[in-house]
Image (tube, rainbow, N blue to C red):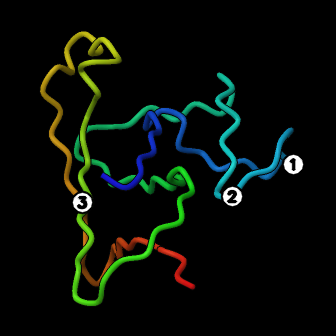
């Protein structure tokens, strides 16, 4: 594993406010007024950053992204959501992507 990041879907709203600290990705306020509950079956955009790293990879290696509904060793599951179904849309309407800065 190279790095990780996390964001509860409820807090997916990207804030227009100036963050109180230096950010390398989108700023989420985590305020109750900005909460946006996920609705089953409805597509939602979720944008977050990963912990910054510096790594040199050999030519030909591939990156893998793992998406999980919870980290069972750290967080207790939300009642009724113990086995979430996560669907990543990738089509002509919803263009999912990963932005990886390279030097």
Query: Along the polypeptide, which appears first: circle 1 or circle 3?
Result: 1
Instruction: Determine crowd level at label 2: few under 14, some 14-19, many 20+ residues with C-alpha closer than 10 A.
Output: few
Q: Callout 3: helix, strand or loop?
A: loop
85 or 97, which is in the foreground? 97
Question: Which residue matches tag 2?
Answer: 24
Residue at image position (60%, 45%) is 13
Q: Is residue 62 left or right of residue 50?
A: left
Q: Is residue 103 left or right of residue 22?
A: left
Residue 18's disc number: 1
The x, y position of residue 71, in whole percent, is 29, 27
74 or 56, which is in the foreground? 56
Q: Is residue 6 left or right of residue 82?
A: right
39 or 85, which is in the foreground? 85
Q: Quadrant of residue 68?
A: top left
The x, y position of residue 14, in whole percent, is 64, 50
Task: Report the Cα–Cα distance between label 1 and label 3.
Answer: 30 Å
Instruction: Determine crowd level at label 3: few under 14, some 14-19, many 20+ residues with C-alpha closer than 10 A.
Output: few
Tags 3 and 2 touching, CB below 8 Å? no
Q: Is 43 drawn above or below residue 13 in the view shown?
A: below
Q: Callout 1: helix, strand or loop?
A: loop
Task: Report the Cα–Cα distance between label 3 and label 2.
Answer: 24 Å
Query: Along the polypeptide, which appears first: circle 3 or circle 2?
Result: 2
- Which of discs 2 and 1 lies nearer the camera? The answer is 2
Residue at image position (54%, 54%) is 49
Tags 1 and 3 touching, CB below 8 Å? no
Residue at image position (30%, 11%) is 76
Question: Which residue matches tag 3?
Answer: 88
The x, y position of residue 5, in whole percent, is 45, 45
């Amino acid at each position: 594993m190279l790095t990780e990041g996390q964001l509860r879907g409820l807090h997916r709203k990207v804030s227009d406010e100036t963050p109180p600290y230096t950010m390398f990705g989108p700023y989420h306020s985590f305020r109750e007024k900005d909460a946006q509950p996920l609705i089953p079956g409805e597509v939602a955009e979720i944008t977050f950053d990963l912990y910054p790293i510096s790594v040199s990879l050999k030519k030909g290696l591939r990156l893998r992204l793992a998406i999980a509904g919870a980290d069972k060793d750290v967080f207790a599951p939300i009642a009724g959501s113990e086995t979430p179904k996560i669907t990543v849309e990738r089509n002509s309407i919803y263009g999912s992507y990963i932005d990886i800065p390279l030097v």
